Image: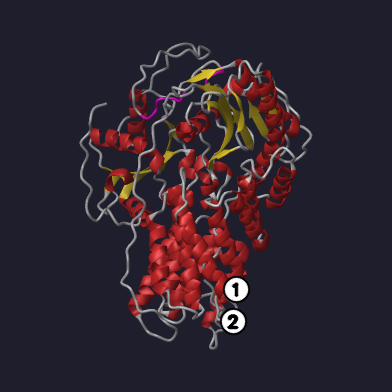
């Protein structure tokens, strides 16, 4: 399809249109293609990728577009339904029966949306997909003729595939003899700026802001579905299948299944020119790792499904460390793995060789802490005289070292899996077993293990233990930005008290600032932007807490870092969660001093909390933020708005309904008892 000229967006973005196309950034190619099809036919369409005005709040803008449009088409994908605000889109459109899901991948539709007739685009060529879009828009009709062939004949005519977003991905990752370095055929995500923030005018430093204790809470962790039963699948040199629990009637499919999906690539030798070469010995070493992991996991009886594929299913690794993360992401896309293990043998001078094992953790395993994802060295490199293929002693050493480390890696993998599911006690137990394993020494890249132990301790409120684990990671790697970030956050949470003069530990909070600042200089790919936004969120919280406790007057510093956290937002669920918490921090910062009537300041605080609610991840956190908004509205004199906010909180979080309504009643009483403030 050629270049399509589409109508320019109206400045206000509220003029009635025929179709609003709702999508996430990753699906922008699909959304713009659908919009172009509609506009080529003569319909008016609005789509975020084209029409979102600079500086607009995209959640509020989306709501306005649904109201104005005759029909809302939802570009339905797993990425779309993973967003915290997606339900707002299709729930609102369902009220007027004006929503049509357009599935661009084989993903389940959530909730009531599953009962709505949907349209599949991912299994059609461009001509058929265009026809389906126009039928969905009501401007074409399905031909009322019998399909060719007797109904039992399920053959189909050949499809002339064209380069539109529906080009299917390859069936599976290559075999052990195939190259797996080509770029994926999936349409690449289209970059889009995060929602821009409005910088309010700086106010004079003030002594104290009063808010409920819920103020700036910890980031929430998204609950994930648990697959009950243990299934450990092995695809080794003969791609065999071993099931510990559960049944299987064939070889592994092209996409892995289960809670933990480990892909072990064939290891490679790299020559002086940087070219890689497969060898039987390195492939055997990779198969050994896969087999050893299976043996280590086999006796484990836990509610976790684990699948391990060896090099015969996954193929070879790329030659350079620099392209490893991108290639690992390709393996994740094609095989559905969430951990990728690889190893590379390189020359070190004229007479030495170095073997380096590494592994990659996909962000899906660390919800709420995606900055922990990425690639890590799995133990120290193994060095020996040159000539791996001709050196049986070195081959035996590599196999011995890898066998020992694979056992530790198996426990580490289980711990990360439980971390992803929110089973933090189980995660701690498994990670501790990995730490106690004789095959993984502190000198062998063990800081990643201590990093996860620290994060797991923080998730359960054991901040003192978390600090000790982070400190161990930092002792191994003094420039480990992720560990410094975790240390600073745990120190803040342990020392803030209620952010009052008599409860804060001032020296510890100032130490937290220093560690955050050190971490800011140590951020590294692939999630450096997310890590930077979390660091700025943390700095904003510390400065706000010290100011709230009347220890310092750093409101402007807090405001500055909260704005940076918003501007650095990545636009994905993890990034929006950080942005939501930063807006909540700004809501605190913008409040006027107690007893001071400043309508403009109250309005800035109200706007900030509304943005926080719009971006919040999960009904419980949204409800908590709504109560903070209600407090500000009530104090500023907007009693009706306060009542609506508290009632909406009670509706979103019925478990705590009585508490929210009691808070509202307390505010309305002649002598309300103000809760202690907390940053």
Horizontal side of 623 relative to 494 (left or right) equals left
Q: How is the image coloured?
A: secondary structure
Q: Main secondary structure of the magenta part?
A: loop
**SS at mark 2 in the image:** loop
**Upstream in the sequence, badge 2 or badge 1?**
1
Classify the position of the N terminus by image quarter. Answer: top left
Residue 263 figure quarter: top right
Q: Quadrant of residue 119?
A: top left
203 with respect to 269 (left or right) = left
Q: Residue at x 45, y 14 (%)?
A: 156
Q: Nearer the viewer, residue 263 or 50?
A: 263
Asked if the residue at tag 1 contacts the one at tag 2, i.e. Cβ–Cβ closer than 8 Å, the answer is yes
Q: Would you call the spot at circle 1 few (<14 residues within 10 Å), some (14-19), or many (20 or more)?
A: some
The stretch drawn in magenta includes residue 675: no
- The reply to whether residue 340 is visible in this rendering is no
For the residue labelled by badge 1, is the local secondary structure a helix, a strand or a loop? loop
Span of residues in magenta: 165-176
Vertical side of 601 occupied by 273: above or below: above
Q: Residues within 10 Å of mark 2 (few under 14, many from 20)?
A: few
As measured in the structure, the alpha-carbon distance from the residue carrying label 2 to the one carrying label 1 is 9 Å
Name the disc covering residue 497, or none: 1
Q: Position of residue 131 (x, y in %)?
A: 34, 27
Q: Is residue 173 magenta?
A: yes
The relative height of residue 236 versus residue 215 in the rendered view (above or below) is above
Question: Is residue 541 visible from the viewing direction of this image?
Answer: yes
Task: Report the residue that reaches farthest toward the bottom.
Answer: 670
- In this figure, which residue is indicated by the disc labeled 2? 502
Q: Residue, x 32% and y 69% (percent of image)?
A: 200
Q: Left or right of 336: which side holds 642?
A: left
């Amino acid at each position: 399809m050629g270049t399509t000229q589409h109508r320019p967006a109206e400045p206000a973005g509220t003029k009635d249109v025929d179709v609003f196309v709702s999508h996430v950034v990753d699906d922008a190619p699909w959304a713009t293609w659908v919009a172009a099809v509609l506009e080529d036919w003569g319909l008016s369409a609005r789509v975020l990728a084209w029409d979102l005005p600079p500086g607009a709040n995209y959640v509020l803008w989306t709501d306005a577009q649904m109201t104005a449009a005759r029909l809302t088409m939802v570009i339905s994908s797993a990425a779309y339904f993973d967003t915290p605000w997606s339900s707002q889109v299709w729930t609102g459109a369902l009220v007027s029966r004006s929503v049509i899901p357009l599935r661009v991948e084989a993903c389940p539709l959530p909730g009531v949306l599953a009962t709505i007739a949907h349209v599949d685009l991912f299994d059609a060529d461009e001509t058929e997909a265009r026809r389906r879009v126009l039928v969905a828009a009501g401007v074409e009709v399905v031909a009322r003729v019998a399909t060719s062939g007797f109904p039992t004949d399920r053959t189909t005519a050949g499809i002339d595939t064209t380069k539109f977003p529906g080009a299917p991905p390859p069936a599976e990752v290559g075999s052990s003899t195939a190259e797996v370095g080509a770029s994926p055929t999936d349409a690449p995500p289209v970059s889009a700026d995060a929602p821009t923030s409005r910088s309010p005018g700086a106010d004079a430093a003030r002594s104290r802001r009063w808010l409920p204790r819920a103020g700036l809470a910890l980031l929430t962790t998204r609950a994930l579905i648990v697959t009950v039963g243990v299934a450990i699948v092995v695809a080794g040199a003969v791609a065999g299948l071993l099931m510990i629990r559960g049944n299987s009637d064939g070889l592994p499919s092209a996409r892995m299944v289960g809670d933990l999906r480990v892909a072990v690539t064939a290891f490679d030798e790299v020559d002086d020119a940087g070219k890689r070469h497969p060898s039987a010995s390195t492939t055997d070493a990779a198969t050994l790792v896969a087999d050893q992991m299976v043996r280590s996991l086999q006796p484990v009886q836990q509610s976790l499904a684990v699948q391990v594929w060896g090099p015969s299913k996954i193929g070879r690794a790329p030659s350079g460390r620099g392209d490893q993360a991108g290639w690992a992401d390709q393996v994740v896309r094609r095989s559905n793995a969430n951990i990728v293990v690889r190893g590379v043998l390189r020359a070190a001078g004229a007479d030495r060789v170095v073997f380096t094992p590494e592994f990659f953790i996909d962000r899906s395993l660390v919800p709420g802490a995606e900055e922990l994802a990425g690639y890590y060295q799995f133990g120290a490199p193994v060095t020996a005289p040159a000539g791996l293929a001709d050196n049986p002693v070195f081959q035996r050493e590599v196999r011995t070292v890898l066998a020992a480390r694979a056992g530790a890696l198996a426990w580490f993998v289980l711990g990360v899996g439980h971390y992803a599911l929110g089973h933090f006690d189980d995660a701690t137990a498994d990670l501790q077993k990995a730490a106690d394993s004789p095959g993984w020494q502190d000198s062998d890249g063990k800081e990643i293990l201590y990093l996860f132990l620290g994060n797991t301790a923080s998730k359960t409120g054991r901040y003192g233990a978390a600090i000790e684990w982070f400190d161990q990671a930092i002792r191994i790697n003094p420039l480990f930005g992720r560990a410094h970030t975790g240390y600073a956050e745990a120190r803040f949470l342990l020392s803030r008290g209620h952010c009052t003069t008599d409860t804060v530990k001032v020296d510890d909070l100032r130490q937290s600032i220093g560690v955050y600042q050190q971490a800011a200089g140590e951020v590294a790919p692939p999630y450096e932007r997310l890590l930077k936004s979390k660091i700025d969120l943390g700095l904003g919280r510390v400065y706000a807490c010290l100011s709230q406790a009347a220890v310092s007057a750093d409101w402007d510093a807090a405001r500055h870092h909260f704005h940076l956290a918003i501007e650095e937002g990545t636009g994905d669920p993890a990034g929006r969660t950080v942005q939501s918490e930063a807006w909540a921090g700004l809501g605190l910062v913008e409040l006027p001093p107690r007893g001071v009537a400043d309508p403009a300041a109250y309005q800035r605080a109200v706007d900030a909390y509304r943005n926080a609610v719009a971006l919040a991840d999960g009904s419980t956190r949204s409800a908590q933020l709504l109560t903070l908004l209600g407090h500000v509205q009530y104090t500023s004199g907007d009693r009706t708005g306060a009542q609506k906010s508290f009632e909406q909180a009670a509706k979103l979080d019925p478990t705590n309904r009585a508490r929210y309504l009691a808070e509202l009643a307390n505010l309305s009483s002649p002598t309300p008892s103000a809760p202690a403030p907390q940053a």
